C-alpha cells in the first residue's frame, strides 16, 4: 500500500496549493478579465473607430499567441525592460489579459444578441444609455453569456497549471515536485487531475444554478435543457 | 400642445420624411395611416427622438405640469440635440410597440415600475402602488407577478400600455399596436386604447388597423412618400378623401370601411 500512502500524504499539500494559488489566481483573473472584457466589448461595439481598433488589436494579439509564451514574456522577458514582477502577479497579469480577450468576444456577442426593441423600450420610458445598459440589456445578455463564460472560467482553472512554468507553486507544480521525489508520476498526476476535476465540478454546479436563476422568466419552450 | 414642423428625416441617402407638419392638441387622438414605407413609424420615432430628424422643429408647450416648462428643439444635421434635452422629451412621452418589447426578465409589475424607480427615483412602495393602479386599469391586476412569456400577446400589449403610461406622459405614441395580434386579441387592445382616449390621453398612432383608426382616432393623417397627403376626421378621410392618392389607398380598404363606418 505504498502508493496509497503517497496519495494520502500528498493530498492535503496539493489541495492547499490549490486553495492558496490555483483558486485565487483563477478567481482574480476571471473577475479582472471579465471587467477588462466588458470594457473591450464596449469599445468594439460603441467605441468609434479608434477605440474599437485598439480593442480589436488587443484581442487579435492575445488570441493569436500561446498563453505559455505570454506568461514567459511577462515573467522572463519584461525584466529586460526593467520591469521585474513576482511570479504570482506576473501570472495574474497574463491570465487577466487572456480572459479579457476571450470574454470580450463572448460579451460582445451577448450584448449584440439583445433585440434593438429592448433598447427602444428602455429609451421610451426615459432611461439614459447607461441605465438602459445596466437595467435592461446586461441582465438579458448575462443569461446568454453564462454558458460560454463558464466554459472560459473552467478552461482558466485548468490553464493556471501553466503558471508552474513561471515558478508559481500552484497545484500542478506541487505534483511535479512530489513526483520528482517519489518517482510515482502516474499516481501523483492522476491525483492532481482529480483535484482539478473537483474544482471545475464546483464551477459547473454554480453555472447550472446561475443559469436557472437568470432564466427563471423563460417559458419552458425557450429553456435550453 | 405638441407640434412638429418641417420634419425631414432619412436613413443614409434615402429620404423617409420630406417636411412633415403635425400639431397635436391636448386630448387629441391622431392616427397615421398610409402604405408601408410611407414614414409612419419614422414620424412617431421623431416625436420621442428615438430617431433624430435632420431638419425641422419639435415643440412641447403648455404641458400638464407647468413646472416641466416648454421644450423647443430645432434640428440640424450637424448638431445632435443635447442628451439632457432628448431625455426630457422622452420623459414626457410614452410609447408602445408592434412587438410589445416588454422586458422579458421582469414581471408585469416590474415592467410597469421600472421607469418610475430607475428613471424618476420613486420609492419602491409608491411605484408599486402606481403600477398596480395601472395594471388594474388595463384589466391585468391578476397578472402582476407573471413574466411576459406567460402572457398572451394582447395581455403583453396591455402591460406595455401600462408601462408607457406609468410616468403620466403628455403623449402616448403607438407604433402599430395591434399588428402583431389576432383579431380577438387586437380587440382587447383597441378597447383599452379607446378607454384611454375617452379619458383624454393624447395619442398619436401609426396603424394599418382600420378599427383602431376609425373608432379610436378623431383625426386621421394619410402619410405617403414622406409627406402628409391629407388629414381630417376619419369619416372624411375614409368616406370622402379629397386626394386621388388617398382615395386609391383607402379603396383597398373599402370593405372594412363600409362595415366600421356604416356607409
Image (cartoon, rainbow, N blue to C red):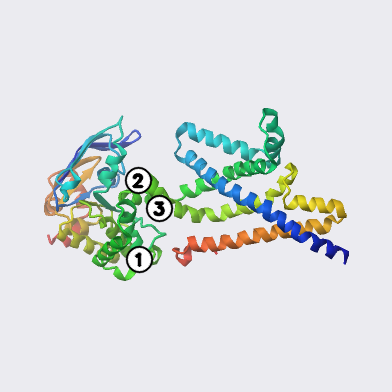
Q: CA distance from mark 1 to mark 3?
A: 24 Å
Chain letter for mark 2, please.
Answer: A
- Quadrant position of residue A63: top right
Horizontally, residue B40 falls left or right of residue B13, namely left
What is the crowding at mark 1: few (fewer than 14 residues within 10 Å), some, or many (at least 20)?
few
In the image, residue A90 sits, relative to residue A3, either above or below, namely above
Residue B39 at least partly seen: no
Who's the residue at 58% across and 42% down the image? Answer: A101
Chain letter for mark 3, please.
Answer: A
Residue tagged 2: A128
Who's the residue at 50% across and 56% down the image? Answer: A143
Where does the C terminus of chain A fall, quadrant-wise?
bottom right
Chain letter for mark 1, please.
Answer: B
Residue B67 coordinates in the image, percent (x, y): 18, 47
Residue A22 coordinates in the image, percent (x, y): 68, 52
SS for tag 2?
loop
Between discs 2 and 3, the one toward the N terminus: 2
- Quadrant position of residue A75: top right
What is the crowding at mark 2: few (fewer than 14 residues within 10 Å), some, or many (at least 20)?
some
Residue A176 coordinates in the image, percent (x, y): 80, 51
Q: CA distance from mark 2 to mark 1?
A: 29 Å
Q: Nearer the viewer, mark 2 or mark 1?
A: 2
Where does the N terminus of chain A fall, quadrant-wise?
bottom right
SS for tag 1?
loop
What is the crowding at mark 3: few (fewer than 14 residues within 10 Å), some, or many (at least 20)?
some
Residue tagged 3: A135
Residue tagged 1: B152
Proximity of marks 2 and 3: CB atoms separated by less than 8 Å: no
Residue B12 at least partly seen: yes
- Quadrant position of residue A78: top right
In the image, residue B87 sits, relative to residue A49, either above or below, namely below
Q: Residue furthest bottom?
A: B142
Amino acid at each position: 500500500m505504498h502508493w496509497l500512502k503517497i496519495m494520502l500524504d500528498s493530498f492535503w499539500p496539493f489541495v492547499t496549493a490549490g486553495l492558496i494559488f490555483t483558486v485565487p489566481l483563477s478567481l482574480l483573473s476571471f473577475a479582472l478579465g471579465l471587467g477588462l472584457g466588458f470594457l473591450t466589448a464596449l469599445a468594439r461595439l460603441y467605441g468609434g473607430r479608434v477605440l474599437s481598433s485598439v480593442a480589436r488589436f488587443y484581442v487579435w494579439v492575445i488570441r493569436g499567441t500561446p498563453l505559455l509564451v505570454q506568461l514567459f514574456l511577462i515573467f522572463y522577458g519584461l525584466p529586460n525592460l526593467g520591469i521585474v514582477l513576482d511570479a504570482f502577479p506576473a501570472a495574474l497579469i497574463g491570465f487577466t489579459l487572456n480572459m479579457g480577450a476571450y470574454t470580450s468576444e463572448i460579451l460582445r456577442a451577448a450584448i449584440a444578441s439583445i433585440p434593438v426593441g429592448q433598447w427602444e423600450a428602455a429609451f421610451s420610458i426615459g432611461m439614459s444609455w447607461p441605465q438602459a445598459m445596466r437595467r435592461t440589456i446586461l441582465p438579458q445578455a448575462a443569461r446568454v453569456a453564462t454558458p460560454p463564460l463558464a466554459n472560459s472560467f473552467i478552461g482558466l482553472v485548468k490553464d493556471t497549471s501553466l503558471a508552474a512554468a513561471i515558478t508559481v507553486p500552484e497545484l500542478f507544480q506541487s505534483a511535479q515536485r512530489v513526483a520528482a521525489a517519489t518517482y510515482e508520476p502516474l499516481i501523483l498526476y492522476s491525483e492532481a487531475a482529480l483535484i482539478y476535476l473537483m474544482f471545475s465540478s464546483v464551477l459547473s454546479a454554480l453555472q447550472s444554478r446561475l443559469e436557472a436563476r437568470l432564466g427563471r422568466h423563460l417559458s419552458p419552450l425557450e429553456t435550453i435543457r | 400642445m405638441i407640434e412638429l414642423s418641417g420634419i425631414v428625416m432619412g436613413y443614409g441617402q434615402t429620404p423617409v420624411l420630406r417636411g412633415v407638419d403635425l400639431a397635436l392638441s391636448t386630448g387629441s387622438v391622431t392616427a397615421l395611416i398610409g402604405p408601408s414605407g410611407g414614414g409612419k413609424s419614422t414620424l412617431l420615432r421623431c416625436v420621442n427622438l428615438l430617431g433624430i430628424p435632420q431638419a425641422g422643429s419639435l415643440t412641447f408647450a403648455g404641458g400638464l405640469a407647468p413646472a416641466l416648462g416648454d421644450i423647443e428643439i430645432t434640428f440640424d444635421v450637424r448638431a445632435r440635440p443635447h442628451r439632457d434635452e432628448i431625455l426630457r422629451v422622452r420623459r414626457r412621452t410614452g410609447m408602445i410597440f408592434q412587438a410589445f418589447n416588454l422586458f422579458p426578465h421582469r414581471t408585469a409589475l416590474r415592467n410597469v415600475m421600472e421607469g418610475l424607480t430607475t428613471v424618476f427615483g420613486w420609492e419602491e412602495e409608491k411605484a408599486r402602488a402606481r403600477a398596480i393602479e395601472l395594471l388594474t386599469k388595463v384589466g391585468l391586476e391578476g397578472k402582476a407577478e407573471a413574466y411576459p412569456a406567460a402572457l398572451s400577446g394582447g395581455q403583453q400589449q396591455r402591460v406595455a400600455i401600462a408601462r408607457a403610461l406609468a410616468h403620466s406622459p403628455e403623449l402616448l405614441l403607438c407604433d402599430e399596436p395591434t399588428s402583431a395580434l389576432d383579431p380577438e386579441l387586437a380587440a382587447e387592445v383597441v378597447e383599452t386604447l379607446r378607454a384611454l382616449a375617452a379619458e383624454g390621453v393624447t395619442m398619436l398612432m401609426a396603424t394599418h388597423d382600420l378599427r383602431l383608426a376609425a373608432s379610436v382616432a378623431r383625426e386621421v393623417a394619410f402619410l405617403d412618400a414622406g409627406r402628409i397627403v391629407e388629414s381630417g376626421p376619419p369619416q372624411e378621410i375614409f368616406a370622402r378623401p379629397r386626394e386621388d392618392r388617398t382615395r386609391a389607398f383607402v379603396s383597398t380598404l373599402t370593405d372594412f370601411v363600409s362595415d366600421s363606418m356604416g356607409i
